């Protein structure tokens, strides 16, 4: 399990998942996690996006969870340098995975989320903006996207296994009140439970 000193915005909840029989890091909005170990990283996404990044040779990898593409140009604001924003979240994840021993030429990524989960918010296009951002960012960085499940209308629960690169995605057919609230104000934390839906393997 990750033994480095806990960093700001690092996963706040690490536990042993009995169903998958492995150590697991659960990340919330504005958090991320990376590891050398054979474990799982899990999150729940609405309009947010997660990048599942790994070195395909060493298996070093990690996942982030960001809420908006950027801080709206507020470069002097502390909130602009926040894991809630894709520009910062992607840079931190890539840099930390490289520092952990991954090689840039071996990096590959799978991206998920960006769902229009609340019809009343479709005009804001938050999910579409997040999805477009992550693909554009990775293209500019020269990192290959090997799988994606973006946009649509469903929240998703994402299970990522960095060592193998496997990702399991479950579409959540009902949106609970906590997820709906977090979608409305972006800054609150997600709390959704799987309530049916098909599991897809990426």
Image (cartoon, rainbow, N blue to C red):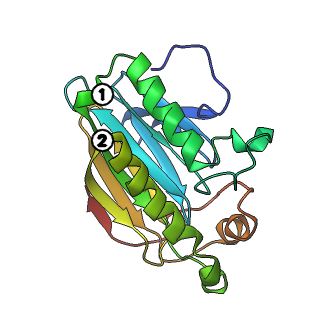
Q: Which residue is mark 2?
A: 142
Q: How far across and how far down the image is residue 119, in percent?
A: 60, 86
Which comes before the other along the chain, label 1 or label 2? 1
Instruction: Name the residue at the right extreme.
Output: 77
The image quadrant that residue 48 belongs to is bottom right
Mark 1, Cα crowd under 10 Å, few <14 / some 14-19 / many 20+, is some
In this rendering, position of residue 102 left or right of residue 175: left
The image quadrant that residue 88 belongs to is top right
Q: How far across and how far down the image is residue 122, in percent?
A: 60, 82
* Residue 20 visible to an observer of this rendering: no
Query: Are circles 1 and 2 on residues that touch, CB within 8 Å?
Result: yes
* Residue 73 visible to an observer of this rendering: yes
What residue do we see at 80% from left, 42% from top? 77
Q: Which residue is mark 1?
A: 104
Mark 1 or mark 2, which is nearer to you? 2
In this rendering, position of residue 133 left or right of residue 163: right
């Amino acid at each position: 399990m990750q033994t480095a000193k806990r960093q700001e915005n690092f996963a706040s909840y690490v536990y042993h998942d009995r169903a998958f029989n492995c150590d697991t890091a659960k990340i919330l909005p504005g958090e991320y996690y990376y590891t050398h170990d054979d474990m799982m990283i899990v999150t729940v996404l609405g309009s947010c996006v997660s990048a599942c990044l790994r070195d395909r040779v060493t298996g070093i990898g990690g996942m982030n969870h960001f809420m908006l593409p950027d801080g709206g140009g507020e470069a002097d604001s502390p909130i602009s340098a926040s894991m809630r924003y894709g520009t910062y979240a992607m840079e931190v994840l890539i840099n930390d995975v490289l520092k952990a021993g991954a090689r840039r030429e071996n990096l590959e990524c799978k991206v998920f989320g960006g769902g229009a989960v609340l019809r009343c918010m479709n005009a804001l296009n938050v999910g579409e903006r997040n999805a477009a951002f992550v693909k554009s960012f990775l293209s500019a960085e020269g990192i290959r996207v090997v799988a994606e499940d973006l946009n649509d209308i469903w929240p998703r629960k994402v299970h990522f296994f960095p060592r193998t690169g496997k990702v399991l995605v479950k579409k959540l057919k009902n949106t609970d009140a906590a997820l709906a609230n977090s979608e409305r104000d972006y800054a609150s934390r997600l709390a959704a439970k799987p309530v049916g839906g098909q599991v897809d393997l990426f």
